[in-house]
Amino acid sequence: MRHTLIRFCCVFAITFVLSGLINAQDELSFAVKTSPSVEFNFTTVNQYLTGATVSNAITLNIESDVQWDLYVGTQTDEPGFWNEISTYSIHGDKPPVSILQMRVRNLSNTSLVSGFVPLSDITDPVYIIGSEAEDFPVNCPDQGTNAPGSYLVNPNCYRFSIDLRVVPGFDYKAGLYSLTIQYVLVEDL
């Protein structure tokens, strides 16, 4: 029996959003060291089943004079599903954003995200540091570090490397899809 592999190509733009109420004398910012897009191409059955990973796809550098939260979510035309650019088949379903997973790491293990976790819509974000509620200050190097600090002074706590993985399986319509990932840094009020 001959199997034909279908190209499932995922290209996504990454946008960065900085929001929150910050006093005039306080600073909260992050710098991004990354390409504006990452592409996944699947050419073997094993890649469809186990996924394809791009290590260090994104690096986030945090600088803050205030306590902060950092969260991430996807933004698409139809919340929860990838944007369809073109398809190669009429068979299969539109892929959900949850097939895209991320792993967030830094040298002090301060992220609240361990291992790969599926992404979700920005209306139900994944918190990397902090939560929706007001958080207690956590100093570096403890997990959940949200205290003021800088990647320039302490990169072990304030520089995050993000690995991305897509695990498509065989249930989705072959094609070219895109989505936007929003990283949001806010003052913890």
Image (cartoon, helix red, strand yellow):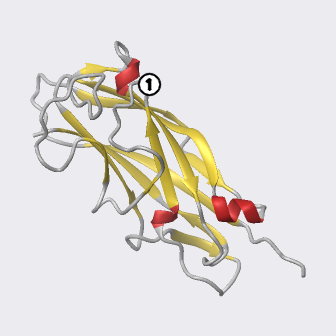
The secondary element bearing badge 1 is classed as loop
- The number of discs equals 1
> Would you say 6 lies left or right of 37 here?
right
Q: Which residue is mark 1?
A: 107
Residue at left offset 70%, top offset 59%: 47
Q: Quadrant of residue 69?
A: top left
Q: Quadrant of the C terminus?
A: top left
Q: Residue furthest top?
A: 153
Q: Residue furthest right?
A: 1
In the image, residue 33 sits, relative to residue 174, either above or below, namely above
The picture places residue 25, in percent across and down from the top left corner, at 11, 22
Residue at left offset 19%, top offset 22%: 65
Residue at left offset 12%, top offset 48%: 133
Q: Quadrant of residue 17?
A: top left
Amino acid tagged 1: Leu
In the image, residue 180 sits, relative to residue 169, either above or below, namely above
Q: Residues within 10 Å of mark 1 (few under 14, many from 20)?
A: some
The picture places residue 16, in percent across and down from the top left corner, at 38, 44
Q: Quadrant of the N terminus?
A: bottom right
Q: Quadrant of residue 92?
A: bottom right
The picture places residue 58, in percent across and down from the top left corner, at 50, 38
Residue at left offset 76%, top offset 66%: 45
In the image, residue 34 sits, relative to residue 179, either above or below, namely above
The picture places residue 56, in percent across and down from the top left corner, at 56, 36
> Would you say 38 lies left or right of 26 here?
right
